[in-house]
Amino acid sequence: MDSNNTKTFMKFAALAMVLVALVVLEEPTSIPVCNIDANYLEKCRPAVTGNNPPPPRNECCKVLQAANLECICRFKSYLPIFTIDSSEVQALLSKCGVTTIPPCLSR
């Protein structure tokens, strides 16, 4: 495995360990990511998964409006792992009234 593959694997492994830890904990644990609590991102999952996602709930939009979207761009490649359709992200942001969408989150 070359150096780049090793680094990518290590980043993925670290992310996977954090996510597994979140799932197995009995009490919700708050992990701040991009100016938002990672647990709150779950409020947006229904609006970006499946073939015909429902409109975002108000709680989801509040999370997105407070998020550092440039920061979220760094994690875009991980979205499919969480069954999030990256093509739905821009539409979700628009539905939530977010007008400044970074190019990395645009279609």
Image: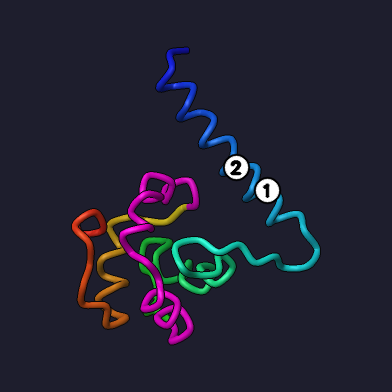
In the displayed structure image, the side of residue 36 where residue 28 appears, left or right: right
- Whether 28 is among the magenta residues is no
Place of residue 25 in the rendered image (x, y in percent of width and height, measured from the top left): 77, 58
- Location of residue 102 (image quadrant): bottom left
Place of residue 80 in the rendered image (x, y in percent of width and height, measured from the top left): 42, 47
- Residue 16: which numbered mark, if any? 2
Q: Is residue 52 above or below residue 3?
A: below
Q: Nearer the viewer, residue 53 or 15?
A: 15
Place of residue 46 in the rendered image (x, y in percent of width and height, measured from the top left): 47, 70
Residue bearing mark 1: 20
Q: Residue at x 52, y 74 (%)?
A: 43
Looking at numbered disc 1 in the image, what kind of residue is underneath it? Val
- Location of residue 28 (image quadrant): bottom right
- Main SS of the magenta part reads helix
- Location of residue 62 (image quadrant): bottom left
Numbered marks: total: 2
Q: Residue at x 71, y 51 (%)?
A: 21
Asked whether disc 2 touches disc 1, contact meaning CB atoms under 8 Å apart, the reply is yes
Looking at numbered disc 2 in the image, what kind of residue is underneath it? Ala
Q: Residue at x 39, y 65 (%)?
A: 48
Magenta stretch, residue numbers? 57-82
In the displayed structure image, the side of residue 48 where residue 27 appears, left or right: right
Q: Judging from the image, what secondary structure is the residue with disc 2 in?
A: helix
